[in-house]
Image (spheres, rainbow, N blue to C red):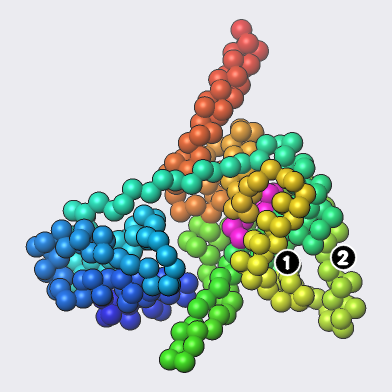
Amino acid sequence: MERWLRGVKNSIGAGAFHQYDSHVREHLIPSLGHLLFVDLERSPQAIEEAMTSFKRKDGRQGELSPLFIKKVWSTLRTACNKAKKLRLITVNPCDFVDPPKVERKEMRALSPSQVGEYLEVFDATDLGAAVAVAIGSGCRRGELLALRWRDADLERGTLRVERSLEPVTITTPKRKRYELRFKEPKSKRSRRTIPLPLFAVERLRRYRVEQAQRFMAAGVRPDGDTLIFDKDGQPWRPGSFGLRFTALRDAAGLPKVRLHDLRHSYASLLLQSGADLKTVSTALGHSSVAITADTYAHVSPVMLQSAADRLGDLIEKHA
């Protein structure tokens, strides 16, 4: 497992590696480290027994969530796949062990009228432009906070997603410290150009002037590498940005949706307006259309009814 960690360190993002490292050192090695991979191959039930023995390492009370245990199982499965490629084992023992069942969190999407409420309320806050772009582009939080002005073409009304912002934990023998890093997008298809609706373009234009005035007052001249959405000239910490969003939402009494639900709202409204799955999948940066279809299966009845209505109109015109 430690050799596998050394091998993947330079091929994945810092955040993903930190998660792998934590799973391996805090849960997998303590529970399975006395076994060889061939032992797991012969007795996959050892993995089931290990999953029931995982304990919290953060000092908090309570059991680990099924979602967390499933993530640890997934880390082991990924490592076993590599071991299989290296011919250390012939089959992946995780394929014979079912991970815990995880209930999917309810996905909430804003209606068109609720989108109007959000835009109106947030327009008077420091997050007005960011919320407008989130709703109008479907960007993930990290993608949104990594945008630079050279990624925005306000004449054409497009955004280019080139990178993402993530918090990273750096562990040293003496202490832990936290940094923000820019990284490659989540997948190859996450690198994309997104057309923006007019409301997002107009809000960005106003915000660019406001930001330039703020920077100039501080003696700084913004340029193409300036972050679009900054916190006192520095990148927002993703967690702090989310807390600010929640505080403003609750203070205004708006419908309670998560920041990530603005992305869901974008996709759901696109689908309801008649966009096909391929188009929406490309806009969201999903690695496959299947992910989009599975995530937004609840929109299918609306899409089918809309398609049926359009078919009826077409037939009537030529009847």
Does residue 20 appear in this view? no
Q: Do the residues under discs 1 and 2 have CB atoms within 8 angstroms?
A: no
Compared to residue 149, the image places residue 109 above or below, namely above
At a point 42% along the width and 72% down the height, the residue shown is: 59
Q: Quadrant of residue 275?
A: top right
The segment highlighted magenta reads: 134-141
Question: Can the viewer see residue 147 in this picture?
Answer: yes
> Disc 2 designates what residue?
209
Place of residue 317 in the rendered image (x, y in percent of width and height, measured from the top left): 65, 13
Q: Main secondary structure of the magenta part?
A: helix
Residue beneath the point at 77% across and 41% down: 116
Q: Which residue shows up at 68% across the image and 49% down it?
A: 135
Q: Is residue 139 magenta?
A: yes
The quadrant holding residue 299 is: top right
Kindly identify the amino acid type of the residue bearing the numbered disc 1.
Phe
Q: Position of residue 146 (x, y in %)?
A: 64, 68
Along the viewing direction, whichever of 63 and 109 lies nearer the viewer: 63
Residue 172 x/y as whole percent: 45, 89
Q: Which residue is mark 1?
A: 229
Q: Amino acid at mark 2?
A: Val
Pick the quarter of the image with the N terminus.
Answer: bottom left
| 137 w.r.t. 210: above or below | above
The answer to whether 145 appears left or right of 210 in the picture is left
Which residue is at 86% across, 59% downward? 206
Position of 287 with respect to 44 (left or right) is right
> How many other residues sit within 10 Å of disc 1, few (<14), some (14-19) or many (≥20)?
many
Query: How busy is the neighbourhood of tag 2: few (under 14 within 10 Å), some, or many (20 plus)?
Result: few
Measured Cα–Cα span from mark 1 to mark 2: 13 Å
Quadrant of the rendering where the C terminus is positioned = top right
